[in-house]
């Protein structure tokens, strides 16, 4: 039986070394009794919340990395915890959280080890176990990455085809979303897209001697209807894709899957990929009307997220947050718990690059864009009609060790504004537009922060145009560091 290495103890400090700053409590495991708080608790508000800000900030992320026998090894792993910060419109706020009740969570807690693995953690069991499950490989349903809404259903997702439904008001788990089709797509993007008509789209990967990217649209009966299949020799790592008004754009990373390892090797998810820069990358544009596919060569790249995709005349344009090689090792749990380092800070400072995909060209044209950041945000209502002017994201100062500031990029002027707080971690800035906004940046950003002196996490409310702080919500608990949020009106 494979043994899963236990992560190092928290905050290793040697003689003469400064202690790890307490802001890294956001990577401490949450006790089940503390995390599962179905009854909302009052939060303290400093400053004045906008009167129009009525709704809920939903957050999702890993929250239990340490189990009695073995622990998870990567920030991206850990059992999922859902959070709701409610803004009732009375000037106050309330907070509660509940664990996502999945098969992975139940088995892992019962057996005291990560049972279905994760991004940097192996699936439990040896070769015999893998052979038994050969026709239907074991894969996690630990939806700790993204929150999405599909035809009124609220979903928690990770990078597999196993999706979990939950109630956005109570955060109660409602069971697995069972696909009503026969597609076998064990790997799926964690980030689906919703088009201007409200249809939910995602991309899966079929593994084999040759592979396929499969673009699907989902109807009301949870049937994934295939729009396009893109055959490739070895599929690249897929975390997200982008959608313009007429095209979906899929980037084929140079970090490429080894299909047989997924079936037999018993390694972590990340260890099933090889960095193959000599083969470069490919960018694929799918016409959403007829499913036709055009492809372009690109330099070897690795990317989690795309700020936007749009059409410009006959060209398809894709903006990406690009790293020159995979960054999963830089976000290893032990490295981050020790306070991060220059490499983990560099992972937060992805290059902002534009790729222009022109008819008749074999290679994408690369245009540099201002700013270095990841976890991008745009005004989605504006993006549904064409290119956006403003992009927000999370970034890090040189040598900080992790995300610690918010950045705003103005594509029209090239201006970059940063909101800095060197004593805290600052994660994804979620954009919430004003109900009657007349400008694309009319609204606020909701930013999850944790500083050394904070008793619990903060939700900072920043003016989206200036990044000036308008209010701070002090939560009654530390929210573990997650990735993405969603606004519920």
Image (spheres, rainbow, N blue to C red):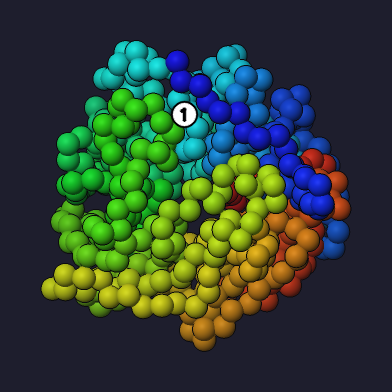
Q: Position of residue 244 (x, y in %)?
A: 34, 63
Q: Which residue is mark 1?
A: 122
Q: Position of residue 307 (x, y in %)?
A: 45, 64
- Residue ranking furthest to the bottom: 413
| 150 w.r.t. 443: above or below | above
Q: Is residue 127 left or right of residue 156?
A: left
Q: Position of residue 470 (x, y in %)?
A: 77, 67
Q: Is residue 1 left or right of residue 255?
A: right
| Quarter occupied by the N terminus | top left
Image quadrant assignment for residue 369: bottom left
For disc 1, the neighbor class at 10 Å (few under 14, some 14 to 19, many from 20) is many
Residue located 36% across and 38% down the image: 272
Residue located 41% across and 58% down the image: 325
Q: Is residue 39 left or right of residue 446?
A: right
Residue located 61% across and 42% down the image: 333
Disc 1 element: loop
- Residue ranking furthest to the left: 360
Image quadrant assignment for residue 302: bottom left
Q: Is residue 142 left or right of residue 57?
A: left
| 15 w.r.t. 464: above or below | above
Q: Nearer the viewer, residue 111 or 136?
A: 111
Residue 120 in sight: yes
| 300 w.r.t. 11: above or below | below
Residue located 33% across and 54% down the image: 253
Q: Position of residue 161 (x, y in %)?
A: 37, 33
């Amino acid at each position: 039986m494979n043994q899963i290495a236990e992560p190092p103890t928290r905050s290793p400090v040697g003689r003469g070394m400064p202690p790890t700053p307490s802001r890294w409590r956001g990577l401490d495991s949450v006790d089940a009794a503390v995390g599962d708080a179905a009854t909302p608790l009052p939060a303290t508000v400093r400053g004045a919340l906008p009167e129009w800000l009525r709704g809920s900030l939903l957050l999702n992320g890993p929250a239990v990395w340490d189990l009695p026998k073995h622990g998870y090894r990567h920030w991206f792993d850990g059992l999922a915890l859902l959070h709701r910060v409610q803004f009732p419109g009375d000037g106050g706020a309330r907070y509660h959280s509940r664990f996502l009740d999945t098969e992975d969570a139940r088995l892992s807690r019962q057996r005291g080890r990560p049972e279905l693995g994760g991004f940097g953690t192996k699936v439990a069991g040896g070769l015999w176990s893998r052979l038994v499950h050969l026709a239907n490989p074991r894969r996690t349903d630990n939806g700790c990455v993204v929150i999405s809404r599909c035809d009124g259903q609220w979903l928690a997702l990770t990078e597999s085809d196993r999706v979990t439904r939950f109630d956005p008001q109570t955060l109660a788990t409602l069971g697995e979303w069972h696909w009503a089709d026969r597609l076998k797509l064990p790997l799926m993007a964690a980030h689906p897209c919703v088009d201007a008509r409200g249809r939910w789209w995602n991309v899966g990967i079929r593994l084999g001697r040759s592979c396929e990217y499969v673009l699907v649209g989902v109807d009301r009966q949870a049937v994934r209807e295939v729009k396009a299949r893109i055959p490739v020799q070895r599929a690249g790592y897929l975390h997200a894709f982008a959608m313009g008004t007429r095209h979906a754009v899929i980037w084929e990373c140079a970090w490429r899957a080894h299909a047989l390892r997924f079936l037999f090797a018993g390694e972590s998810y990340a260890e099933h990929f090889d960095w193959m820069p000599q083969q470069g990358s490919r960018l694929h544009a799918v016409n959403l009307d007829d499913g036709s596919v055009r492809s372009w060569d690109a330099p070897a790249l690795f990317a989690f997220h795309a700020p936007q995709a749009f059409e410009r005349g006959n060209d398809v344009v894709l903006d990406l947050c690009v790293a020159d090689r995979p960054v999963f090792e830089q976000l290893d749990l032990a490295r981050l718990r020790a306070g991060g380092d220059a490499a983990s800070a560099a992972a937060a400072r992805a290059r902002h690059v534009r790729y222009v995909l022109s008819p008749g060209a074999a290679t994408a044209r690369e245009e540099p864009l201002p700013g270095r950041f990841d976890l991008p945000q745009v005004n989605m209502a504006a993006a549904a009609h064409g290119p956006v002017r403003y992009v927000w994201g999370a970034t890090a100062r040189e040598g900080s060790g992790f995300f610690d500031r918010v950045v705003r990029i103005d594509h029209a002027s090239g201006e970059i504004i940063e909101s800095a707080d060197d004593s805290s971690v600052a994660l994804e800035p979620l954009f919430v537009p004003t109900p009657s906004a007349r400008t694309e940046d009319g609204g606020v950003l909701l930013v999850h922060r944790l500083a050394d002196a904070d008793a619990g996490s903060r939700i900072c409310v920043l003016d989206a145009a200036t990044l000036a702080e308008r209010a701070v919500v002090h939560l009654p608990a530390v929210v573990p560091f997650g990735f993405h949020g969603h606004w519920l009106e």
